Amino acid sequence: MSNAQENGNGFKFAWIAFLWACGFMAACKIMYNIAWYEFAPGMHKPVTFVAGVLLFAVLALAPAIVYPIGRKRGASGPLLVLVSFLTLLIWDAWEVYRVTEFFTIGESLYYGLNSVFIAAVLAGISEMGAWEAYFRKKEKKEGGPGLMGPVLTALAGLALLYVVMFWNLGQSWFYIYQSGYRALF
Amino acid sequence: MAEKNISRRGALRLMAAASVAGAAGGFPRSLFSAPTNGKKPNVLFILTDDHRYDHMGCAGHPFIQTPNLDRLATQGVYFNNSFVTSSLCSPSRASFLTGQYAHTHGVQNNLTPWNNDNVTFLERFKQAGYDTAFLGKWHMPGELPKLRGVDEFVTFTVRGGQGQYWDCPLIVNGEDAMPNKRYITEELTDRAINFIDRDSDNPFCLYLSLKAAHHDWKPPTDLKDLYSDEELPLAEEADTWVTMTNGAVFCGTTGTLQYHYRNYCRVVTSVDRQVGRLLKLLDDKGLADNTIVVYAGDNGYFWGEHRKIDKRWAYEESIRVPFMIRAPGVVPDPGRKANQMALNIDLAPTLFDLAGIEPHAGMEGQSLAPILKNGRTPGREAWLYEYFKDYPYNVPAIQAIRTQNNIYIEYDSSRKPEYYDLKADPKEKHNLYDQLDAADISRYQQMIAALAKEGRL
């Protein structure tokens, strides 16, 4: 199989993985938000608990699933990174749309840069960096790209993730985010 | 840290004993209906953060132990129908200080700055010959003001003015300072005790503004396991992840609902313990019979009700607060529960009334002193709830009219207005807006307009 064929085949699998992740995310969101407590009060707590866990998992791990599936079958480059992030981007677009009830268009777009989205992107960068390092080590191509780049990418992603989500439990980042809002609006 | 280590069981036992003593009259009620010999009364106002109306022993909570707050309720008047006119820290705090609605004092949300032209009740007390202090959470946007008429101003600006439970850096009369105690509630209480214990012949007016029970709910170490085995009385519609979904990420509640709720209860108990220290000091110094003590919360809090966390919305869990006044020599029947609606904007006019200070122009609250003196005094008929947009929190601007038995809510969004019959539907599950006729809606809208313009009906 030529490189181009491998690449195309890899993307086919990456798109399929994305569609699964996206569909799964939508199902979890619908399950979580549906008014179970009105129809089946006994089911509300367990259903929302499981749906919530799965929703967080798919948002945090979609790139870790899509990227290696495509990469293993030969896909690579910026388009694979984009496909890996698509689930997250769709979720964020939905969030931006949802908050247009409360905010202006500009404010809603800025809302799209909220800490959950940023943290999920950073987690995705780390995951993809780790997978890329794994594949490069496995392939051991003569004269091929080294491990340093993806390893550093993964570590930088983790460090920034700490700053956004875990530095004072995210409060410090929140005040930076608020300063940005004041400056812009 | 000076916090004494006691076991969870020991702590519960102590609190239960104190509770029983209060209920059984171990603390003399008659003292709090005694005359004050014509001396100017001292004022101790304790304001907590996010303390919801029903999270006290005297409010019927199934396990929270608050013997000292219960004692206050027993020795004064417990306004069990009390509200804030804006359920958000900064506007509500400014309303307590000024006796005005948010649309009047101008602190509309956590982003709009305090106007230095605002007159606080502390300023008026100073003019009346009092020693005054503001100790604790200021948390209003903009530069820290040089509060007129405040002799001692201790606050913090860390974390956007929210402060932190442990090792909170302070600003003491404009100068940076480190706390003497590691736990902020204890530090502020120590400073309050020192202020009350100062060497002065003047009466005092002390505003003690605690960080507790705001997130991130870190209890003192000896209370960290308190209530661990209790079954949580969470609403049927509550779920574990309501703390992190649908925009709740900004509410500082990353983690599970149950984890945060237990810590909230522990932090409320830690507040009660410090209130106990203050009440004991007043007793020990012989000041109790001439000191007005007021305890209130700045807003309520959702713990999963309506599938929400945080506050802001116009539902009962968010807008109702604890509010009790112990006014020796004023209340003929201490221990009374008052059903008349009391508001945060009523604090300043009430204190003026009790201290014989003439209220100034522009105040929109009304004195509760007549209700303190006579339980049959009618209360207000209606009041305005207002919430202004506070980015990035997912809540539209709100105006609502709350009457004794109903609430009418309008949103500045495409959201349908709401109307609840609170007697028949106290949990506000059934929106009756569609059953209102045009005349009813018009009447409520006119009330909103009148209150937003004049502050009174």
Image: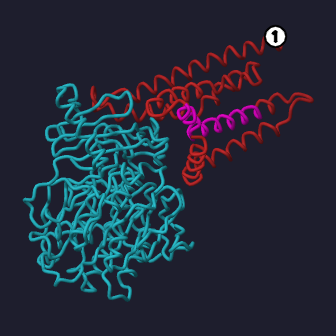
Query: Which residue is more in the foreground, B113 or A107?
Result: B113
Q: Colour of chain B?
A: cyan
Give the residue drawn at x 36%, y 84%: B197
Give the residue drawn at x 56%, y 33%: A112
**Above or below, B96 relative to A139:** below
Q: Is residue A9 visible?
A: yes
How many other residues sit within 10 Å of disc 1, few (<14), some (14-19) or many (≥20)?
Answer: few
Q: Is residue A32 left or right of residue B297?
A: right
Give the residue drawn at x 33%, y 44%: B386
Q: Position of residue B428 (x, y in %)?
A: 23, 37
In terms of secondary structure, what is the magenta stretch mainly? helix
The red-tinted chain is: A
Which residue is disc 1 drawn over?
Answer: A1
Query: Which residue is more in the foreground, B208 or B355?
Result: B355
Q: Position of residue B173 (x, y in %)?
A: 50, 74
Q: Position of residue B215 (x, y in %)?
A: 44, 54
Q: Chain of mark 1?
A: A
Q: Which residues are magenta?
A: A106-134
Q: Is residue A114 left or right of residue B363?
A: right
Query: Which residue is more in the foreground, B67 or B172?
Result: B172
Q: Quadrant of residue B206?
A: bottom left
Q: Is residue B55 visible?
A: no
Amino acid on which disc 1 is placed: Met
Q: Position of residue B383 (x, y in %)?
A: 23, 47
